[in-house]
Amino acid sequence: MQKLLINGKKELVGKIIISGSKNATLPILAATILSDHVKLTKVPLVKDIFTMVELLKFIGLKVNISKKDNQIDVRNHDKNIKTLAPYKLVKTMRAGVLVLGPLLVRYNKAKISLPGGCAIGTRPVDLHLFALKKLGAKIKIKNGYILAEAKKGLKGSTITFPSISVGATENALLAAFKAEGKTVLNNCAIEPEVRDLVKFLNNLGGNIKIKGRKIFIIGCKKIKKTVSHKVIFDRIELGTYMIAAALIGKKISLNKVNPELILTEINTLKKMGVKLKIKKDTIEILKSRNLKKINVSTKPYPGFPTDLQAQLMVLMTRASGKSVIKENIFENRFMHVPELKRMGANIITNNKIATIFGPSKLTGAEVMATDLRASVSLVLAGLVADNRTIINRIYHLDRGYESLEKKLKNCKARVKRI
Ligand code: UD1
């Protein structure tokens, strides 16, 4: 099994081009079922994307990946289609459940494996099913599978989500895109990735508008046969490298981004004393020391993202005083804490709250990655720690970070995969 070896304490300097967003690409790939031909550019070539491609191929779509220029070309000829998402594919990547909406729209039925638990929490799909039922789908659960049917197609409806979910908002959008008449979705997730899906669906012929946390959809009557789309930048990858630079950067420039979309993250880092220069499509981080404590709660967008909580915690270990994180989105998302403590961090957790006492001197250790964002937090800790850090189970990292070692090495980090 591959490991990542990091010799810490080397100041980072250089440029990083931020990849396309994994979390935006996944629902858009699911949406390719709706069209005959889709060309996607700026696709991050990471494991979760390959798993989604495998699922589309299993369903019967023709998919071509051009690795050299980060493009994916998907064609749906309506031939030998299986309206099935099997357990082996959905269990490794929960976003597989997003094909439910598009399959119902185009083929009026779908059989999708329930994703099951996951390292960071139970992560049910009840809100996805709630929305689809409101649109007229008949849904049963049998032998671990969701059996969904909409023999006469879906019908527009008003749906008020009891709580905010990115995936459920996306599945509802995918299903309502072509539902007869008008649909109003209330209490939606409005993450930039949801907006990117809306942009894609509107290019496809949709009529979708977002106002606050409401989304208005008028059922599409004519879907375009061919459509191209450039995926939005990955704001979580950007935030991760901003924190790396704040930890041990001399001067790092993060390119091809839209700073307007990460104002909460920028303000959080500024309050901690991180020196940033914001330009039109670049963020520059200058040497930042004497970091200050801060209290942060994770929230749906535009709040502070749960996907950056573990990384921010590493920065907090270097700040003076008592910082507090409240994790509001997932119930089991502090698995990086025991590993950070083994590296010298002083952290106490109690239910949803982590209290971080800093500044701590971090020292290298052999540690274990447990999920995607937890593993990258260990990389960040390794970059700033004394001596050598060995990170095991780095397949978690490969699910979501494109060319991580290459990007860090270009900035002079001493990182090696063995
Ligand atoms: C997406 C992101 C993930 C991010 C998360 C929250 C993708 C591929 N993944 O995951 O990286 O951490 O948003 O920003 O985009 N919930 C229910 N019932 C449901 C669905 C969700 O109770 O049917 C709960 C979840 O358990 C969780 C909360 O709602 O506590 C938010 O989850 P959700 O926004 O749905 O996350 P994902 O879409 O799975």
Image (spheres, rainbow, N blue to C red):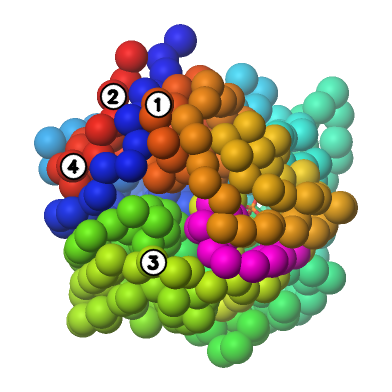
What x and y, as percent, mark residue 216?
59, 83
- Evaluate whether residue 45 shows in this view: no
- Rendered-image quarter of ligand 1: bottom right
Residue where numbered disc 3 is placed: 289
- In the structure shown, which secondary structural element does the residue marked by tag 2 occupy? strand
User: What amino acid is at disc 1?
Assistant: Arg
Give the camera-side residue of 397 and 347: 347
How far apart marks 2 and 1 lie (CA) works out to 11 Å
Give the camera-side residue of 189 and 404: 404
What x and y, as percent, mark residue 268?
51, 76
- Answer with the quarter of the image where residue 127 lies: bottom right
How far apart marks 4 and 3 lie (CA) works out to 19 Å
Give the camera-side residue of 388 and 217: 388
Residue where numbered disc 1 is placed: 388
- In the structure shown, which secondary structural element does the residue marked by tag 1 occupy? strand
Q: Give the label, 2 or 3, closer to the camera.
A: 3
N-terminal of the pair, mark 2 or mark 1, is: 1
N-terminal of the pair, mark 2 or mark 3, is: 3
Mark 2 CB within 8 Å of ligand 1 = no
Identify the mark at residue 412; answer none if there is no mark: 4
Stretch of the chain drawn in magenta: 313-327
